[in-house]
Amino acid sequence: MRKLRFKKIDAFASQYSAGNPAAAVYLNSADDLSSAEMLQVAKELKGFVSEVGYVSPGTDTDYSLRFFSSEREVAFCGHATIAILNDIVANSAAMQDKAILSIATNSDRLVVENRYKSEKCVYISAPSARFSAKKIGVTDIVTALNCHANDIDQLQPIEIVNGGLETLVVPMAGLESILSVAPDLRTLNEFCIQIGVDIIILYSPESATQDSKYRTRVFAPTFGYLEDPATGSGNAAFGYYLLKHGKWDGEMMKVEQNSFRDLPNYVQLFSKGVDIGNCQVWFGGGAILKVDGEYLLR
């Protein structure tokens, strides 16, 4: 039996919203656990957290991170990154004084802007955007989402964007339309696999709170669960989508997310640069520690 340093942290949580739960496992070295062991822990935690982030000292960065859902390794998990980095700076005087931190994932080197002392949050630079030319038909989307054709705003582009994960961006007709979507996990998973995406983000410019620019919902069936209540990578892809189509000036904006009309989670977005070929979307938020202890791996 092995003892692992373990925390459960709710990313993007506040006193009014539950956020998105992530597990953080702190390792002395990236080699402390095998990939199979990391997946085993994530499987055992299914239903308790969405993803598990494994943190170790970096070689050419401050920290190295890997992410696992109960189904597979995840290329990038924004909410787990937010949870972990908030926890790190909250508990390290040295890191609290660092304005910029660096992290490595399996595919990217990312920058963390530390605003913990002033705002009790951190901001993460999302991976650079990649846009797919693949066209997805509205009829197929309607079937997969179990919604009506008039729930989708067919005047706006439907597009696959990668801001860390392959993300299908779907414009919805309004707040009622986005809140009413209730897909079947298996059907949606098969659709995502068929078109080659990791997640689906729905959006509407009609929001429930005055200071939110958009309402979003994110579905992640390929990771073993239906809906993600607060998402870094999905909203980053959405930010790149807005920049490409001239719908955002890159200034700080608040996006509300989840299926609850009056109790949404909030994700902050801004962009450094607005030229889609030379810009970086950043996403940020706070986190609340819920469990602090050890995980016993047998």
Image: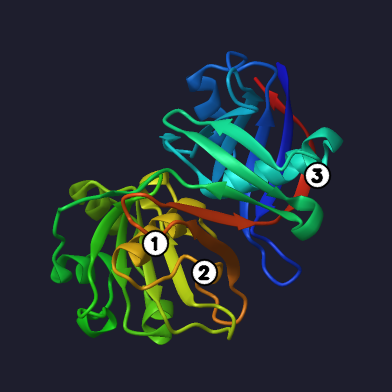
**Crowdedness of circle 1 by 10 Å Cα count: few (<14), some, many (20+)?**
many
Of callouts 3 and 1, the N-terminal one = 3
**Crowdedness of circle 3 by 10 Å Cα count: few (<14), some, many (20+)?**
some
| Disc 1 versus disc 2: nearer the observer | 1
SS for dot 2 = loop
Q: Which residue in the rendered view is the most extreme toward the top?
A: 31
Measured Cα–Cα span from mark 1 to mark 2: 15 Å
Residue 49 visible to the viewer: no
Residue at screen point 36% across, 73% down? 247
Residue at screen point 36% across, 49% down? 278
> Which amino acid is tagged 2?
Asn
Q: Do the residues labelled 1 and 2 touch (CB within 8 Å)?
A: no
Which circle marks residue 90 in the picture? 3
**Crowdedness of circle 2 by 10 Å Cα count: few (<14), some, many (20+)?**
many
**Residue 273, image x and y in percent?**
44, 56
**Residue 20, image x and y in percent?**
60, 56
Q: How many labels does the image show?
A: 3
> Which amino acid is tagged 3?
Ala
- In the image, residue 136 sits, relative to residue 88, either above or below, namely below
**Residue 167, image x and y in percent?**
33, 54
Q: In which quarter of the image is the C terminus?
A: top right
Q: In which quarter of the image is the N terminus?
A: top right
**What residue sits right under mark 2 in the picture?**
258
**What residue sits right under mark 1 in the picture?**
238
SS for dot 1 = helix
